[in-house]
Image (cartoon, grey):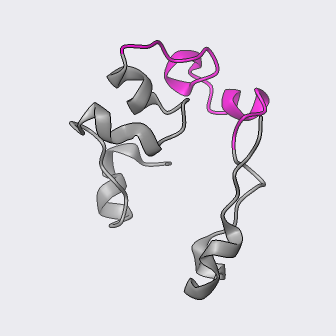
Amino acid sequence: CTDYANRVTLVPHCIDLRGADPASLHWLPDTCAYRLRAQGRPLPEWHYLVSGDRESVHNAGISIRGRTVSDEFVHPDGYDEHIVNWVE
């Protein structure tokens, strides 16, 4: 997200998680800041809010950069063919 303050306006289908029930966040990655904060856990050192460096997540090798395609390029009938469960 390059414009966090205006994300819901710029991307109408953006999900605003502020104030979400912590129990409803189970579907988010274990490293999600909203989920970690709701669980009272600290953010990892590579997180932008800690490091101040937007590249730190990529440098840590845990981002999805280069592993995804936009839904603009996938026919709705083919969504299931593009879901991947990554194994750590």
Question: Residue drawn 49% across and 33% down?
Answer: 32
81 relative to 23, above or below: below
Question: Residue drawn 50% across and 48% down?
Answer: 2
Residue 54 falls within the magenta-colored stretch: yes
Q: Quadrant of residue 26?
A: top left
Asked whether, in this view, residue 32 is left or right of residue 68, the answer is left
Q: Where in the figure is residue 88, as x and y percent of width and height?
A: 77, 34
Q: Where in the figure is residue 76, as x and y percent of width and height?
A: 55, 84
Magenta stretch secondary structure, dominant: loop
12 relative to 36, above or below: below
Span shown in magenta: 40-63
Q: Quadrant of residue 67?
A: bottom right
Asked whether, in this view, residue 3 is left or right of residue 55, the answer is left
- Given residues 3 and 44, the one toward you in this image is 44
- Given residues 39 and 13, the one toward you in this image is 39
Question: Residue drawn 36% across and 66% down?
Answer: 13
Q: Where in the figure is residue 72, as x and y percent of width and height?
A: 59, 79
